Image (cartoon, rainbow, N blue to C red):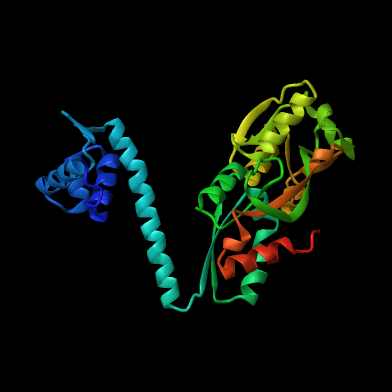
Amino acid sequence: MPNYFQYDLQSLRLFIVVAEVGSLTKAADRTNMTLSAVSKRIAELESSTGCMLLVRQPRGVELTAAGKGLLAHARQVIERVNRMATEMSDYAVGVRGHVRMWANTSAIVQFLPRDVREFLSQNPSVKISLEERLSGEIVAAIANGDADLGVFADNVAAPGIEKAAYHRDRLVLLVPNDHPLAALEEVSFGDTLDFEFVGLNEGSSLLARLLEAAYSAERTLKVRIQVSSFDGICRMIEQGLGIGVLPEVAVRNEILAAGLRPVRLTDRWADRTLWVGTRSRSALSPEAARLFDFMSGTKHA
């Protein structure tokens, strides 16, 4: 029977290094250990798990299926221990509450900086750890406890999540000034589908919304280039590589000065709701609950 109480953090950290460099010798050099000490710790891990974790090759090592499984768990354990150490350090210097929040790009670009600043001005002893993620990832993180709060788009399913309206925003079409659609004040999305688009990467709620709208119109969304940010979309459109859809508030003055123009979309789905969600408000820490109430009570523009 494997002994699951014999694991130690140093061995798990060492195993992660071995997996990353693919060599016991290189792992020894990186960690300032002897090769024999590295081999001994890996052997002890294999004894503890009751599984072969590495296959020794002439030019290094490869992870077995069990090794790949342990690597995923080891990274989670080390990440959680690091998070614990950070939070304890915060408490030691006077921080009274730590809130983990994940949010999508739309929220971070438009609303969260202002709202977080206002909340922290009223709650200076609270620390907020904010990560930018895709809406689907955010919902999963709330469900499994990796995030206390999350801000995500309204077209992402969130079963079992307690949510409230955070903000509403409007999507617009962004085109170069010399584009055929630039002369219009407004346009339906279906009338834009003859043109190539610049879109966000796979998995984004905004791309999913556009694909669904094109499908409903029985058309194909022709995505020429995909990028990871709204700024990336704007830069690609500026170079004539396509047109794009993004939140109206993200169209800043410098974007307009670069020769781009927003065109209003007439489709109902262009008006979106961003949700703030948690697994259970009643189970939140007092600080996280205050932030949830603050965000769900924000005056919506």
Q: Is residue 239 visible?
A: no
- The residue sitting at the front extreme is 1
At 62% from the left edge and 44% from the top edge, which residue is drawn? 135
Quick check: 182 above or below 15?
above
Left or right: 93 in relation to 52: right
Residue 290 rendering spot, x and y as whole percentages: 64, 69
Q: Which residue is pictured at 31% across the width and 31% down the height?
A: 65
Q: Which of the image's four quarters has the C terminus?
A: bottom right
Q: In which quarter of the image is the N terminus?
A: top left
Residue 217 visible in the displayed image: yes
**Percent position (x, y) of residue 92?**
41, 77
Q: Nearer the viewer, residue 134 or 180?
A: 134
Which residue is at the far bottom? Answer: 94
- Residue 296 in the image: above or below residue 274: below
Q: In this view, does 250 lie to the left or right of 57?
A: right
The residue at 87%/34% (across/down) is 187
Q: Nearer the viewer, residue 77 or 1?
A: 1
Identify the image quadrant of residue 209.
Answer: top right
